[in-house]
Amino acid sequence: MVIRFLVYTTPDLRPYGGVDAYLRTCASRAVLDLLTNRWVCLVIGALRPGTLRFGELRRRLDGITQKMLTQTLRDLERAGLVHRAVYPSVPPRVEYRLTPLGDNVGGLMDAIRVWSETHIEDIRAAQEEYDRKAGEELQPV
Amino acid sequence: MVIRFLVYTTPDLRPYGGVDAYLRTCASRAVLDLLTNRWVCLVIGALRPGTLRFGELRRRLDGITQKMLTQTLRDLERAGLVHRAVYPSVPPRVEYRLTPLGDNVGGLMDAIRVWSETHIEDIRAAQEEYDRKAGEELQPV
DNA sequence: CAGAATCCTATCCGATACTG
DNA sequence: CAGTATCGGATAGGATTCTG
């Protein structure tokens, strides 16, 4: 039986039954490791609007190498988040699309990207402030 | 019994001109890189309920080394997501808490962890299915 | 076009030792 | 207690070449 909606009995959003990503032996750590990845986030986000071919994905994800795109797509396909459809034509045509499970996490992946895009200035300002203070400490007036 | 649902409905909006994490030169890529990290996700989630000391964080994040915890906390402090308070006592006492900006992204970080915890079975089943099919291909009946 | 395979290296990260 | 410093192994990931 697959539990799709968890009932939380603790205020800190921790499910019962030993499922806890804060434990190193918990299998959810592996899922977390899969999701906390730059290319995974961008690939899933890119596929949200609909199906894309390999080359289209590569052009969309500026800076990704063919090796990393292939590897990322394989990982996502294996995890059941992405579906791969091969059309035996010449030249070959391979289309990728999100599975229902992939679409389910798609909103979250997009939200991370959007947060990153909308908070650049906050982060940049904080980092400059931090570096400035660190510099002062080394060279006090 | 408390039932909580986390729902993120993110429109595919591009906030302002030129800010696009899909471009390799965009500064938001660096922010995305910061957030898509196992320990960053878990540290922010651990600090959501409130302030924690270094040792408390280390015990909470099972499997983290002192080096990685220090490094993660420095990165988060520099980015303005975590505040570090040093109390000059003996032995030294250092407390970490989320800044308003850190708390702002905290819900997202927690959501990723919770998603990972609640979909282990789906992922595991998909991976077993994938590996089984891959095995069949090598040894056709 | 969509990859597989190979080589190679920058960095990540764990382990260990030391300190105010 | 809360770090800093250093070393070395693992590995993520880039560049290149080749193919159905």
Image (spheres, coloured by chain):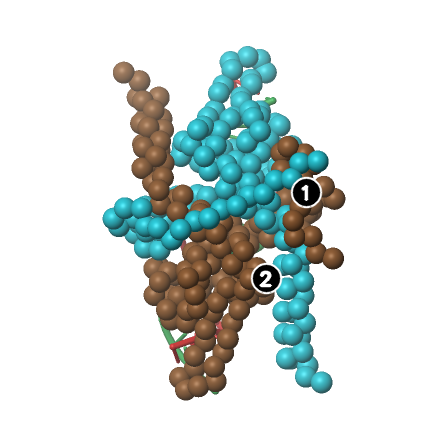
Chain colours: A brown, B cyan, C red, D green
Considering the numbered disc 2 on the image, is that residue within a helix, a strand or a loop?
A: loop
Disc 2: which residue: A79
Chain on which label 1 sits? A
B94, A60: nearer the viewer: A60
Circle number at residue B41 = none
The mark lying in front, picked from 2 and 1, is 1
Q: Position of residue C7 (x, y in %)?
A: 45, 68
Question: Contact, CB < 8 Å: mark 2 with mark 1?
Answer: no
Q: Is residue A53 above or below residue B16?
A: below
Q: CA distance from mark 2 to mark 1?
A: 24 Å
Q: Is residue A128 above or below residue A117?
A: above
Q: Of marks 2 and 1, which one's residue comes earlier in the chain?
A: 1
Q: Residues within 10 Å of mark 2 (few under 14, many from 20)?
A: many
Q: Residue furthest left?
A: B17
Question: Which quadrant: the N terminus of chain B?
Answer: top right
Question: Which quadrant: the C terminus of chain B?
Answer: bottom right
Q: Are marks 2 and 1 on the same chain?
A: yes
